[in-house]
Each structure stands twice: as C-alpha cells, then as structure tokens.
Amino acid sequence: MMDQRLPNEMTNSHILVQDFDYLEPASVDEAIKLMASYGKNAKLMAGGTHLLTMLKMERDEPTAIISLNCVSGFNSIVVDDKGGLTIGAGATIYDIRSHPYIQANYPALSEACASFGSTQIQIMGTLGGNLCNGSPASDTVPALLIYEAQLVLKSASGERRLPLAEFLLGPGKTALKENEVLTAVVLSAALKGASSAFLKVSRVAADLAKASIAVLLVRDGAKVVTSRIACGSVAPTVMRSKKAEAALESKLFSPESLTVVAKVVSEEVSPIDDVRSTAWYRRQLMVAMVTDALNLAWERSDKKVPASKLGIEKPKAAQPIIRHNIKAGEVQDVVLKINGRKRQLRVASNELLLNVLRDQLGLTGAKYGCGLGECGACTVLMDGKAALSCLVLASAAEGHEIVTIEGLQTPNGELDPLQQDFVEEAAFQCGYCTPGFIMTAKSMLKDLPKPNEDQIRDYLKGNRCRCTGYAAIMRAVIKSVQRQ
Ligand SMILES: Cc1cc2nc3c(=O)[nH]c(=O)nc-3n(C[C@H](O)[C@H](O)[C@H](O)COP(=O)(O)OP(=O)(O)OC[C@H]3O[C@@H](n4cnc5c(N)ncnc54)[C@H](O)[C@@H]3O)c2cc1C
Ligand code: FES
Ligand code: FES
C-alpha cells in the first residue's frame, strides 16, 4: 500500500491504517528479547509523538510496536555523588525542562526543552525518542553536545557507552544498532566557572527550528578558556563548530573576537533549503545567533547549585500500570477511567484514544483537527496533564485518569469556573478549538501557581484557533489565573 503512494499524497491522519502487535514489556531486557523475536519490523515506542505521526503519514509500517512506558525507572533523573546527572531515556521533555537541578546547572538543556513545539509534546515526548529519531532539528541535541553527553545503549550482548557526537550519523540516521535500546543519557558535573545558553529561531513558537544554537564558555577574567558551540538545523546532523571554538579559545571576549567567530560558524555550517527556511537565511541567522548566544552566556554565570540545596523530590515509585499484549487484528477488553467513571471497552492495538472517546463513548468534546499533534484540538487531561488524544493508543491509556471537557462540569451541571470565564469573555467563535484550549489551560492552572502573561502564552502555544480568537482566550485564562 505504502509504495503506491505519491510523495505528497494526503493520508488520513485520524486513524492508524496499519495493523500491528502492541506489547508493553516491564524491563529493557524483555524489550530487547521481543525486538529480537520480531526482527527488523518491530519498532520501539516511548512517547509516540514521532513514531505515531510517521505511521499516520504512512511512512512506516511496523509489524509490532514495543512500548517502553511500563519499563520501571526508565524516566528517572538522578544526580550522582560527583554532581553529574543520569537522565533516563524515558524522562519527558517537560520533566527535564522543569527539573530544578537542570535549570541551575545545565541551563542550556532546560532552555532547549522549553523551546519545544508545544507543552503537550513536551509532556508526552521523551529524551530517548528525541535522540533516536536522529533529527538535525532536535532541540535537546545542541544542548547535550555542549555538555558532552554520553549515551548508555543496551542490547543482548551487553551495555556500551557512546559520546552523543558519535551517535549522530545523518538525517534520521544514528549509530543505534538493531535490537539496541537507549537507556540513559549521562552528563558530567558542570564545569567550574562555566556558563551556557541555548537559542532557537522558528517560524512560530510551536515549530521545529529553522536554526538553533547552544554555547558554553569558561572564562578566566576577560579571557575565554574553553568554548563549545553546537548548531542545529544547519547541517545533516546537529554539529559542534570546532573551528569557531578554536577561534575563540585563549582570546579576549570582545566584539572583534565575536565577529571572527560568527564568520567562522557561518562558513562551517552546511544548511539546506527546505519548507522551514532557505540555506542563505540560515547562514545569516547563524551570524546573529552565535553572537547573541555567546553574549548571553558571558553575561550570565551558571549557578552551580548542589542538589541538596534545591530540595529535589525523590523519583516517584512507578505507579502500577496494566500491561498489554494485543495481537494485530484482535481486540482486547480494557477498562478506561474517564471523567471519574470506569468504562469497559474492546479496543484493537491500532485504536487511538481520540477515536474511542468520540466513536465508542460519544464524548465529542475532544475534536479531530490535524491528527498529527500540531493543533491541540484533541487535548484531554491524562493524570492531570495535557495530552494529545490523537497520539495516544487507547490501550495505553488504561491505568491512567482521563478527563475530557465533559468531565469538568460539576455533577449538578454547573460549568467549571474556567469554562465560565470563557463564556463571560466570549472566548470562542466557532468553538472548535475551545475544549482543547480549556483542557490545556486546566493543566497549566495545576502546574504553574501564578503564571505571568508570557508563561500563559508559552503554555498554550500548541493550541491553534482557526478563528484567531486569541485575545479573548487570553483574557479568559488570565481571569482564571487571577482568581487562583
Ligand atoms: C507537533 C510536533 C512538534 C514537535 N516539536 C519538536 C520540537 O520543537 N523540537 C524537537 O526536537 N522535536 C519536536 N518534535 C519531535 C518529537 O516530538 C520529539 O523528537 C520527541 O522528543 C520524541 O520523543 P517520543 O518519546 O515521543 O519518541 P517516539 O515517537 O516514541 O520515538 C521516536 C523514535 O525513537 C525510537 N526510540 C524511542 N525511544 C527509544 C529508546 N529508548 N531506545 C531506542 N529507540 C528509541 C522509536 O523507535 C522511534 O523511532 C515534534 C513533534 C510533533 C508531532
Ligand atoms: S488533532 Fe490532535 S493535535 Fe491536532
Ligand atoms: S473559535 Fe473557531 S477555531 Fe477557535
């Protein structure tokens, strides 16, 4: 079927046409055994934000999807005795962004995660998935390159460590071997006296980078002792600009030295024309971005804060999750907890939560929009956090608390105060995007105690209103924030 498709032929992004076995191993070893038994056609899945969009665009047709979501401890973030960090491959982009130790000691990584497409993608997408899809536009890779991250990779023949720089081979290509799992990313303790920064330019806030940059400086008075510069979206892989680093080291930090470095970076990159930008523009961007990022890093001094001073919560014990093993073409009984009620359903491996909510349960508040994670119309709460139901397999939702817009009203039919604010501020026109906006805002009200206007806009950046009613939506959300 897929080979008959024309390159730009539209697919039906509301369903998964492929049929696959869906498996949820409890350990990495079990996942490795399953991969070996299925051979090349099995695909690992973490958050699914990349894999499921590839399936929806019919660019992949695995016979089995092996989910890593039930692997215990896969999402942990642990500070070691020497002040270094081990981030489990299953840690979400949002957890990394919000981690106080990462914000204080590896700010470029925290900033890179904050720049990600949308809050929902940050909440669902994982670090492992971001590295293993091998994208030259990955936001975490430039930051991890300047901190010289090492990857821990596990297969049946044992464990190996690889510097991230050696993992990246080309667009969509990595050094991940067949039947190998990325289990963790290791960062050494932050360098003494180092400061770092990340910048990204994209068409709109909720988009992949036209270009990105991460820099790290260690200074001695007015002189640069160490400089690391990594650029994204301007070469076949995210790359360190080694010539530019050499041009800055042992020099005084001055406008003249920055002019030289900016020229060297723009000559070292090899950008292309694509839907997001042109090669010419990307090269010009590099000149401005490297200058801005280096100035930013120079002006700030990364605080090296010990974990003991930050009151970091101990990693939560994994919650008991119901594990699934559904064969292609078969259906399985699942019990989904939706709006506080247990609902018994029969679902196939390729059924999506959005379809089940709408078609089996008649909960039509969550809307079909793009089907590809880009509009936020399908947003529901999963364990209190905004999730895109068009990119969640229905069976994987078992064991989680799902809330849709229908679940916000009180038992006697009164609207939630946030819904009431939308009514009072006339924050809707056709209303198609409204449930998605309300559910994302609901997630924000729980997550951020008193967000300012910029934080609200940032949190809602993945929700699109085709009627462009943004001003009224902002008024309604601000009103709810002020009432908190
Ligand atoms: C609307 C939208 C916006 C996006 N915006 C951004 C953005 O701004 N910046 C950005 O960098 N990316 C962005 N992405 C891409 C994607 O969401 C991220 O790369 C995300 O981190 C992928 O993580 P995941 O857990 O969802 O990966 P998945 O989809 O689960 O997996 C991705 C790939 O990695 C493999 N894989 C996953 N985990 C492992 C592992 N532990 N070991 C081995 N292989 C593994 C899978 O087999 C698959 O091939 C966006 C995607 C969408 C749909
Ligand atoms: S329909 Fe899910 S994000 Fe657009
Ligand atoms: S009110 Fe029509 S899409 Fe937002």
Image: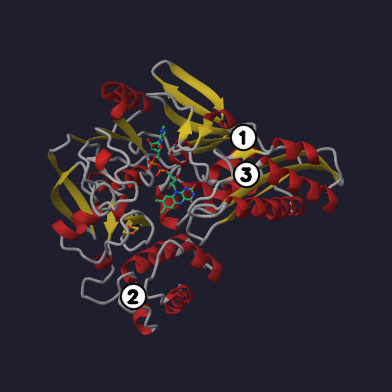
The x, y position of residue 69, in whole percent, is: 34, 39
Residue 484 lies left or right of residue 306; in this view the side is left
Tag 1 residue: 84
Q: Is residue 304 in view from this perspective?
A: no
Q: Which residue is drawn at 42% across and 42% down?
A: 316
Question: Viewer-proximal residue, 395 or 264?
Answer: 264
Quadrant of the rendering where the N terminus is positioned: top left
Residue 352 visible? The answer is yes
Tag 2: amino acid: Gln
The amino acid sitting under disc 3 is: Cys
Vertical placement of 298 versus 474: above or below? above
Numbered disc 3: secondary structure: strand
Q: Where is residue 416 in the image (x, y as percent from the top left)?
A: 32, 73
> Which quarter of the frame holds ligand 2?
bottom left
Among the 4 quarters of the image, the one containing residue 472 = bottom left
Which residue does the numbered mark 3 point to in the structure image? 231
Measured Cα–Cα span from mark 2 to mark 1: 44 Å
Quarter of the image where one finds residue 80: top right
Instruction: Name the residue: 21% across, 71% down.
Output: 411
The span from disc 3 to disc 2 (Cα, nearest Å) is 43 Å
Distance between the alpha carbons at the discs numbered 3 and 1: 24 Å
Mark positioned earlier in the residue sequence (3 or 2):
3
On the image, numbered disc 2 is attached to which residue? 419
